[in-house]
Amino acid sequence: MNLGRDLLARLAGAERGPGGLNAFLSLAERLPPADTTGGGRLHGVPVAVKDNIVTLDLPTTCASRVLAGYRSPYEATVVRRLRSAGGWVVGKTNLDEFGMGSSTENSAFGPVRNPHDLERVPGGSSGGSAAAVAAGYVPMALGSDTGGSIRQPAALCGVVGIKPTYGRVSRYGLVAYASSLDQVGTFGRSVRDAATLLEVISGHDHRDATSADVPVPAFGSAGDRGVRGLVVGVPVEYFPEALDAGIRERAEAALAALEAAGAVLRPVSLPSTGLAIPCFYVIAPAEASSNLARYDGARFGHRSTGVDVAEMYERTRAVLGAEVKRRIVLGTYVLSAGYHEEYYRTAQRVRARIRGEFHRVFSDGVDVLFAPTTPEPAFRLGERTGDPLRMYRSDVFTVTANLAGIPAISVPIGRVRGLPVGGQVLAPWWHEERMIEVAAEIERRLEHDP
Ligand code: GLN
């Protein structure tokens, strides 16, 4: 397979050198199987895998110094499934350390650059996967989405990104950030590519207790039926007065396209949307503080030396990055005796309300919701690294789907000031097909827009 060799050479040269995107943290050591008779949905297709998903033949670092060079003794279910469909894992992609961030600047191995403007971020945390697809290195990639980490970089890089229903895809082998929110999902150059990869990785897995035993529809062939008669809810809270005028204009163009295709637009309200960011930034750090307790140098990964075990732990954990430490401190605080009720319990109640509001609109005859994926196009590298709250607000429109567990897709809707932006279609639990259908219609109708 010269194609495979050529791709590896290209990635090893241009992409990783100075001025490259820094999208990959490691590249395949093996070429894809030479035989081309095997069949399989993804036969010979190079797929990039986010480096928080474990693989046998390549390191899994989570872009953290604490796991530098770490090799897993087992392989994630999603990777096993994509290999058995004939896919070739071409490399592992860069991310914000452990998935914590919205710009990929929190990687211990340097930021990823946006292929549309090298001075700008690709979004995050799956910035490496999004950039690799946007640059044309691979047609599809795997990512993970805890609060927007697939949809936000997909939007900022001008590609398609899918976060499935919580429980649709196995988390076995996805390094845990916030387990009640984490979900593996896909990137593609087109809705069909992202949907095909989703179909391959979906389905029940007895190794993940939160994986649901529900049938997997043919996602890869959804998208040709059209949207006639579908009711598309337009939540007012996702179109605030302060929304970037360019984003508003593109989102309205997408809505007009859906209407022209026969969909019925209906304004709806999801009143608790404004509470989603504070709610997310209590629950996600709380779960992270517990999940990240395992990086203490005792069992795997990096180990520092110390005069006793306490000092060894302390020095080992000191190599974690600033944002990861901030999350651990925050999470430990909101769970601590005396504050647990005030913060963690309150956040859980808000989460139930957000979920309840989605349930209400979807049982009220709304088939899908449409909203912008991000409040702005890609920002400049370094612009938000000193202002965590501002960085956190990059996820205002995406964290709600994770809190509720519903599926959502981001699809390109054109450009704003020369940069790609995305529109988000959110569907009820287990109705990915419907949202793929709507995204495909937007893709067809906006293809030739600016
Ligand atoms: N940006 C959010 C965070 O920093 C969500 C990231 C994600 O989805 N992994 O936690």
Image (cartoon, rainbow, N blue to C red):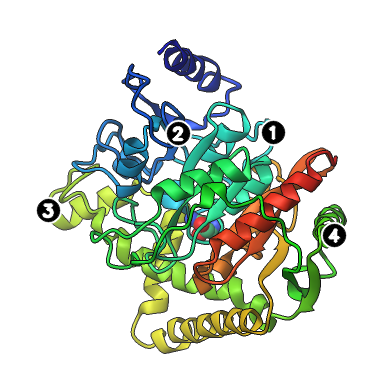
**Extreme-top residue of the structure:** 2
Q: Quadrant of the N terminus?
A: top left
Disc 2 CB within 8 Å of nearest ligand 1 atom: no
Query: Quick one: label 3 or label 2, which is nearer the N terminus?
Result: 2
Image location of residue 101, percent across then percent down:
53, 53
Query: Quick one: label 1 or label 3, which is nearer the N terminus?
Result: 1
Query: Quick one: label 1 or label 4, which is nearer the N terminus?
Result: 1
Q: Closer to the camera, 279 or 237? A: 237
The amino acid type, in three-letter code, at marker 1 is Glu
Q: Nearer the viewer, mark 2 or mark 1?
A: 2
**Extreme-left residue of the structure:** 308
The amino acid type, in three-letter code, at marker 3 is Asp
Rounded to the nearest angstrom, the CA distance separating label 3 from label 2 is 44 Å
Residue contact at pointers 3 and 2, CB within 8 angstroms: no
Whether 350 is drawn above or below 425: the answer is: below
Image location of residue 431, percent across then percent down:
54, 66
Helix, strand or loop under label 2? strand
Q: Which mark is residue 308?
A: 3
The amino acid type, in three-letter code, at marker 2 is Val
* Rendered residue at 50%/47% (across/down): 186
Q: Is residue 389 visible?
A: no
Which quarter of the picture shows residue 236?
bottom right
Residue contact at pointers 4 and 2, CB within 8 angstroms: no
Q: Which mark is residue 252?
A: 4
Q: Which residue is mark 1?
A: 119
Q: Nearer the viewer, mark 3 or mark 4?
A: 4
Q: Which residue is mark 2?
A: 47
Q: Residues within 10 Å of mark 3 (few under 14, many from 20)?
A: few
